[in-house]
Image (cartoon, rainbow, N blue to C red):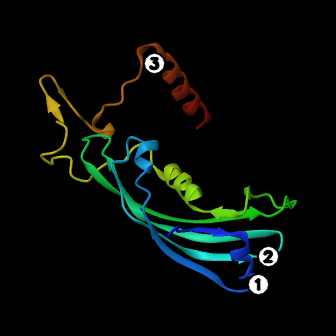
Amino acid sequence: MIYLKWSISQLQKYRNKDFTFDEVIQVDDLQQDDSTIRKVSPMRISGRGDIDATKITFHFKIEGYLILPCSRTLVDVKFPINVETTETFLLQDAIMQLEEDVHHVRGEMIDLKPIIREILLLEVPMQVFCEDDQSEDAAPQSGKDWEVISEEAVPQKVDPRLAGLAKFFEDNQQDKD
């Protein structure tokens, strides 16, 4: 069974009628495109389609989670996915006057899975952090002559080359007061 893939003639039967869908799909092949993704849960795709003579618009929600490595400790972090989107497909080279991204239908089939894959890849954050950095699976947080510290723990030092400039601004503030 092919999920989230319909022929245009199949969709045209729902013109001006309710067309809803609620599917659970596997997108495990995301790991091939982004090596930081360790696991992909089954994704629930639910929504509706608005079908007319010139375009088909899908309004849907993607729910699931990704397992990603913690940027600090490398342990697995469950990153929730909860995305709502609207995707419009133009039929027969129709001209769209709206300022939205549209997809041009090539052939007789509309497949949402490549679009879902792209949305999921865009959802992967650059960094993700786990709550427990003391886990036994975690990368070490200290060693001989080093340790990981937070930004708040770093004292603010003024570059000696800029110390005179800092004093200049302090003098200007006092003159204004």
Q: Position of residue 114 (x, y in %)?
A: 57, 55
Q: Secondary structure under badge 1?
A: loop
Report the front residue among 103 and 141. 103
Q: CA distance from mark 1 to mark 3?
A: 70 Å
Q: Which residue is mark 1?
A: 16
Residue type at tag 1: Asn
Quarter of the image where one finds residue 152:
top left
Residue 163 badge: 3
Q: Secondary structure under badge 2?
A: loop
Q: Position of residue 71 (x, y in %)?
A: 32, 41
For the point 56% across and 33% down, the residue is 173
Report the front residue among 165 and 52. 52
Q: In the displayed structure, does residue 57 sit left or right of residue 78?
A: right
Residue type at tag 2: Asp
Q: CA distance from mark 1 to mark 2?
A: 7 Å
Q: Are the residues tagged 1 and 2 within 8 Å (C-beta)?
A: yes
Residue type at tag 3: Ala
